[in-house]
Every structure is written in structure tokens, then in C-alpha cells.
Amino acid sequence: MKLKQRDKKHLWHPLKQHQTHPESLAIVKAKGCMLTDEDGNDYIDAISSWYTSMFGHCHPYIIEKVSNQMQQLDQIMFSDFTHEPAIKLSEALITILPEGQNRVFFNDNGSTAVEAAIKMALQYYFNKGEKRSTFIAFENGFHGDTFGAMSVSGLSVYNGPFENFLMQIHRISVPNGENISDILSRLETIISSESVAGFVYEPLVQGAAGMKIHDADGLNEILKFFKKHDVLTIADEVMTGFGKTGKHFASDYVETKPDIICLSKALTAGLVPMAITSCTETIYQAFLGNTIAKGFMHCHTYSANPIACAAALASTELLQTEGIQNNIKRISESHKTFEKKIQQLPKVKSTRSIGIILAIDLNTNANRYGDLRDKLLSFFMTNGVFLRPLGNTIYIQPPYVITDKELQNVYRVIEDALIAF
Ligand SMILES: Cc1ncc(COP(=O)(O)O)c(C=O)c1O
């Protein structure tokens, strides 16, 4: 029996309505930019498997480092012990993270990185004897699926059944170059009546919302406002981190730096799950004291798993190589050329790109989660390209190692789709 038949017996997939979409494609191999299914069909992974495998799948350098680590030390608790892979990774990350970050706390995935950041912010004020309970976040943000992360997320399609159980959040518009004074006056109103602990935001690009790009100067004004009012700023760089926007971190485009940063996805280059919540020394210092309760009582069993740390260290090294940095520039320039080429097509409503991220909004009245998205997805797969439209937005986030030929192939299939639908 084929894998896709056996799958149906016991498995329950995430983000899926099994009644209308009973089948899942069985992938048996992934190498570089290519995925191969059980029937031997190849697909270019044009979204790097949810923006994780940025150096291509099964990168030999990362595999070598991970295999060596597996022979040496596989897993050890991180509450009483430490180890070299975690130490080396913290040292490497602090040199590339935006200015001010000095402490690295380990989690398992993007949602728990955000969850820890929220708890860190709440306890930071609690430890200082201040009761702060409210958070502020952007409209249409996405920060993950645990309760704190869902609370700060603004995409209701994911959160509907849980809305009555979420934290109180104030939502503000993203800055668009014209609305900053409205945003700031709204913030003044909120701050004057609420004790705000933190502002959680996806810097510059809102991924799940459809790779929506906002204004860096406006974001800077918002961050300056929060600094002035002693509100902690939490940058969720789970999607944007490690080169996607053309700089190592999206926060590098903004003058005012965050207090806390959430990292995952490309952190381990798609090899194994891991996440990090980093913060400034000031935040860390607020957790020091003579009682255990003043410390951060938050832990995941696999915190700082040595194998995951080895993968993250290897990918951090790769990111900084000239070859990868040149590839990021090359992809970014190709995206701009492609944007110009398709902008006038009647099916194209608008396009945008930053770094290796390119998004195309379709000119359609179709429901965001309707048939069109499914039809496009199946068209792309039939034509050998794995692209997963977000509603009526087609986006590309290819691995940095994608060749020109593969990238042109992805563009060609998108152009075909823009003509066929
Ligand atoms: C910006 C952002 N934050 C958090 C998450 C949640 O990460 P995870 O799926 O690893 O829990 C995602 C996932 O797409 C994301 O894009």
C-alpha cells in the first residue's frame, strides 16, 4: 500500500480539514532545493519548507556537524548542566544579533519562543514590584498557536474557538508611511489608562498575513514610543530571522532595537526543531535574587538539545559566508526584475519584495481561504513547484542555494498560473 493510503489510517495533520482534503502527498527525499514524492516526482521547494531549510535540505556541512555531535553528546538536561554546543551557539548568536541582546534562553518552536517572551515580560515587571498585565500587538499578526502566542496574534481564522480564553490585547495598525500620528495618538490613549507590559510585533514583514511589508521609519517611531514609556518591545523574528529580509535580522533595518527577540525556523536550518528567546542584560538582571521564585521558572525538557545547537551553530556559520550573502543579493535582485515583469498583468493586484521574500497579491474577489488557493496549489505542484499561497497571495521564500535556473523555473510556473487562472 502507498504511504499516502497508510497515512489516512492513524494520522492527524495540522492546519488541515481531513474531510475535504483527505490526502497528503508522501515525500520520501529532500536534497538541496528538491523534494521527491513516493512516485518519483520532483518539486522545487520554493518556500523552503515554511522558511526553515534556507541552506537547502540535508546540507552536507550541517549534516556533518550534527552527525559528529550525535556521536559525542545527544541530550542532557539544561537546568543543572551546560555544554559546549550551547555555549558556542550563544557566543556566535550574540555577535550577529541586533545590538543590546546579551542573553539566550532556549525553547522548542516559534510559538514557545513567543510564549516565553510574554512570560519574561510579565515577570520582569512582577520582579520589580510592578503589576503590568496588558500587551499591544499589530492587527493581523501571527505569533503561533500556544495561548499567549494566540492572544497576541490577530488572525482570527486560527483563533476563533479560543477567543474567550485569550489574554487582553490592544491591537494597533501597522505603519504604512501615512498613519504614524494616528497610531501614536492611539498608543497615548492606551498607555494613559492601562499598565502595558510589552509590545509584540513581527518586524517589517507580517508572514502569515500574506508577507505584508510595513514602514521601517514608522516602526521605529512606535518602538521609540515604547522605550520612552518603559514598555518592553518583543520582536518576533521567527519568520524574518537569519537573512530572509536581506539583512541578518529585520530589526537591523530599524534604528531602535528590541528588548526581546524570538527566533526559530531557519535557526536550525530545517534539520531539527529548536527556538530561542534572547534578551538584554537588563531583563536578565531583573531575574537575579536570593529566591528561586525570582528566577525564570519556565523550561522545556529538550531545552538547548546539543544536536539542535550543533545544527544552529553550523547554519549560523553558513549564513555569514560570502557565498550565501551573495546568493541572498542575487535572489533579491532577480525578485525585483520579476516584479517589474509581472506588475502589469491583469491578474496581479500588487507585488512586494524584500530580500529573498517575494509576494504577489491576486486581483480577485475570491474568498481568502476558498477554492482558488487550492487550485493554485495543485497547479504549482503539477508543474513541479512547491508554493503554498496564503489566501490570495502567492509568495516565494526560496532556499539561499536555489540556482538561477531553478528560480526562473519557479517564476515561469507562477507566470503560467497568472495567465491560466
Ligand atoms: C512570525 C511567526 N511567529 C511564530 C510562529 C510559530 O512558530 P511555530 O510554528 O514553530 O510554533 C510562526 C510560524 O509560522 C511565525 O511565522
Image (cartoon, rainbow, N blue to C red):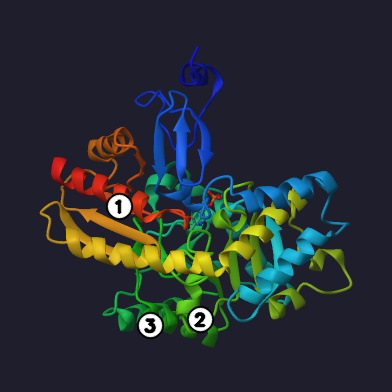
Mark 1 packing: few (<14 Cα in 10 Å), some, or many (20+)? some
Residue 308 shows up from this direction: yes
Q: Amino acid at mark 2?
A: Phe
Q: Which residue is mark 2?
A: 226
- The answer to which of marks 2 and 3 sits earlier in the sequence is 3
**Going by the image, does 391 lie left or right of 64?**
left
Decide: few, some or many residues near mark 2? Use Cα within 10 Å; few <14, some 14-19, many ≥20.
some
| 2 horizontally vs 344: left or right | right
Mark drawn on residue 217? 3
Residue 7's place in the image compared with 326, above or below, is above
Which residue: 66% across, 76% down?
A: 95
Measured Cα–Cα span from mark 1 to mark 2:
43 Å
Q: Amino acid at mark 3?
A: Asp
Q: Secondary structure at mark 2?
A: helix
Mark sitting earlier along the chain (3/1): 3
The circle on residue 212 is: none
* Residue 397 pos. (x, y %): 40, 55
Q: Secondary structure at mark 3?
A: helix
Which numbered mark, 2 or 3, is in the foreground of this view?
A: 3
Identify the residue at horizontal 62%, vertical 63% (top origin): 316
Q: CA distance from mark 3 to mark 1?
A: 33 Å
Q: CA distance from mark 2 to mark 3?
A: 14 Å
Image coordinates for residue 216, horizontal then vertical, percent: 39, 78
In the image, 100: left or right of 134? Answer: right
Please give the residue where the numbered disc 1 appears in the rendered image: 408
